[in-house]
Image (cartoon, helix red, strand yellow):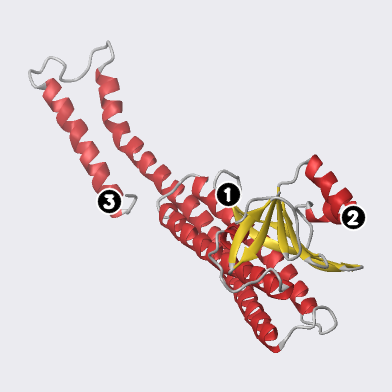
Amino acid sequence: MTIWRQADKVLLPIEKSEPDCWINITQPNNYEISCLINEYGLEADILNDILDIDEQARVEKDGDKIFFIVRIPVFQEDRETPYFTVPLGIIFFKDMIMTICLQESDILRDMLAGRIRHFALDNRKTFLLTVFNRVSFYFLRYLKEINRRSAQTEKELQRAVRNTELIQLLILEKSLVFFTTSLKSNEFLIEKIQKPNLLRLSEEEADLIDEVVTENRQAIEMANIYSNILSGMMDAFASVISNNLNVVMKQLTSISLILMLPTLIASIYGMNVVLPFQDHPFAFAGTLAVSGALAIISIIIFRRKRFF
């Protein structure tokens, strides 16, 4: 739990909460959850919803508090599914703002580091719209990274006979499903925020939320397009992997057949019985010549049949 105040558009850490401050909680433990309930009067049910990784985006009003739950994108390389989404809780108190999240996120990290200028802690609506804008930005950014990764995997798949690359595409498709679901959930939340009786946005704030709506829809379209491309690519390359395996098996079968004839002759002349030309001085050379000739003839036949 960290507490911040804004001075000359710069965020500074403070020890105790004060008017127009921002309380940010990440991965809260039991003590911090108890503190939120006892000191700040938050309902346990609301905290459970915010900390539920499957909770959908929504808005709820309770007295002088307004609760927003937004789905935000997160990237963790060490996870089985590196791109996923988690809920971010934004709570408007009468005189301060609180954010609660299960994971460290680049969105809040950028805001705390001062990489985003156009927001003020004394204007809660601007703060909320800034978060939405940054959420859309990172959705678009991660979608481009997913597309780049799928293009790299596509190149590897063209010569693959294993399932490793196909599983990588399956993981990326799973991430796209997470993104699409979360983006649509956020879209419903934005529509509720646009209603005049909830936040009473000014003309400038209405223009800002229109930009958020546009970027969110763009992210939804990109996620749908990439998901369709990836799904079609997986079907196509499943056939490619099967075909590559068939080609390898055909080549191995051709090599086995080519080597079978010389092996047969060598096996016959390796028997401990009386054989034709066994006393001839060039018997060994003749056997090798016949074996080589049969192998060459087999290669020519397979070439004409386009076996390899």
In the rendered image, which quarter is residue 143 located in? bottom right
Amino acid type, residue under disc 1 in the picture: Gln
- Residue 50 location, x and y as percent? 79, 56
Earlier in the chain: of badge 1 and badge 3, it is 1
Residue beneath the point at 75% across and 60% down: 18
Q: Give the SS element for disc 1.
A: loop
* Identity of the residue furthest to the bottom in this view: 203
Q: Position of residue 243 (x, y in %)?
A: 46, 52
Label 2 amino acid? Glu
Q: Which mark is in front, 2 or 1? A: 2
Q: How far is disc 1 from disc 3 in space, using C-alphas?
A: 51 Å
Label 2 and label 1: CA atoms lie apart by: 30 Å
Q: Nearer the viewer, residue 303 or 126?
A: 126
The residue positioned farthest toward the top in the image shown: 272
- Binning the other alpha carbons within 10 Å of mark 3 as few (below 14), some (14 to 19) or many (20 upward) gives few
> Which numbered mark, 2 or 3, is in the foreground of this view?
2
Q: Is residue 34 above or below residue 261?
A: below
Which residue lies most toward the right here? 63
Q: Contact, CB < 8 Å: mark 1 with mark 3?
A: no
Residue 272 lies left or right of residue 166; in this view the side is left
Specify which label sits upstream in the sequence, 2 or 3. 2
Badge 1: how crowded within 10 Å, few (<14), some, or many (20+)? Answer: few
- The reply to whether the C-beta atoms of the residues labelled 2 and 3 are less than 8 Å apart is no
Residue at horizontal 30%, vertical 33%? 259
Residue at x-position 88% and y-position 49%: 38
| Residue 23 percent location from the top left of the image | 72, 57
Instruction: Please give left or right for residue 174 compared with residue 21 in the image.
Output: left
Mark 3 highlights which residue? 303
- Which residue does the numbered mark 2 point to in the structure image? 43
Q: Which mark is residue 76?
A: 1
